[in-house]
Amino acid sequence: MQTMQQFKADFFKALAHPLRIRILELLADGEKSVTELQQLVNSEGSAVSQQLSILRAKNIVIGTKKGKSVIYSLRDPSISRLLEAARDLFNNHLIDTLSMLEEMEEQDSFKS
């Protein structure tokens, strides 16, 4: 039986690529074909397809055949919330870093 920690580690490994994250952000806005994703990320088809393959293998996205195209979507809407939480963490980290920089600049101006 797979432990929760192992599931989480495998899940986050599957997210550990900037292009995969970008694809998920785009799919959070709604389903898209490979062609649409390629145009939106301005990347070669093989790169997008390769990343979609990894996301499919980890059951993070699903592909549905529609005519000659495959339309991709998020398997679970919770992924959108996870991406939003990561954005919030980034913004909080950025704010903290900017605050530290301002404090350092203030200290430097007092020394002058």
Image (tube, rainbow, N blue to C red):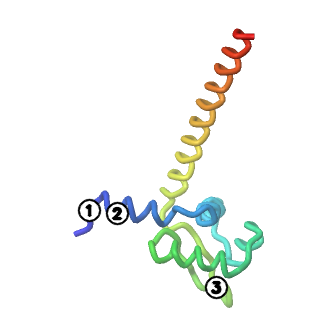
Residue found 75% across the figure and 10% down from its top:
112
Report whether 86 appears left or right of 66.
Answer: left
Q: Amino acid at mark 3?
A: Lys
Residue found 67% across the figure and 72% down from its top:
32
Q: Nearer the viewer, residue 44 or 59?
A: 44
Contact, mark 1 vs mark 2 (Cβ under 8 Å): yes
Contact, mark 3 vs mark 1 (Cβ under 8 Å): no
Residue found 70% across the figure and 9% down from its top:
110
Residue found 26% across the figure and 67% down from its top:
2
- Give the distance between the C-alpha atoms of the residues marked 2 and 3, in whole angstroms: 31 Å
Q: Amino acid at mark 2?
A: Phe
Residue under label 2, please give it: 7
Residue under label 3, please give it: 66
Residue 73 coordinates in the image, percent (x, y): 58, 70
Name the secondary structure under disc 2.
helix
Whichever of labels 3 and 1 marks the residue nearer the N terminus, that label is: 1
Whichever of labels 2 and 3 marks the residue nearer the N terminus, that label is: 2
Report whether 4 appears left or right of 46.
Answer: left
Q: Nearer the viewer, residue 89 or 104?
A: 104
For mark 1, does the 10 Å Cα neighbourhood hold few (<14), some (14 to 19), or many (20 or more) residues? few
Residue under label 1, please give it: 3
Q: Amino acid at mark 1?
A: Thr
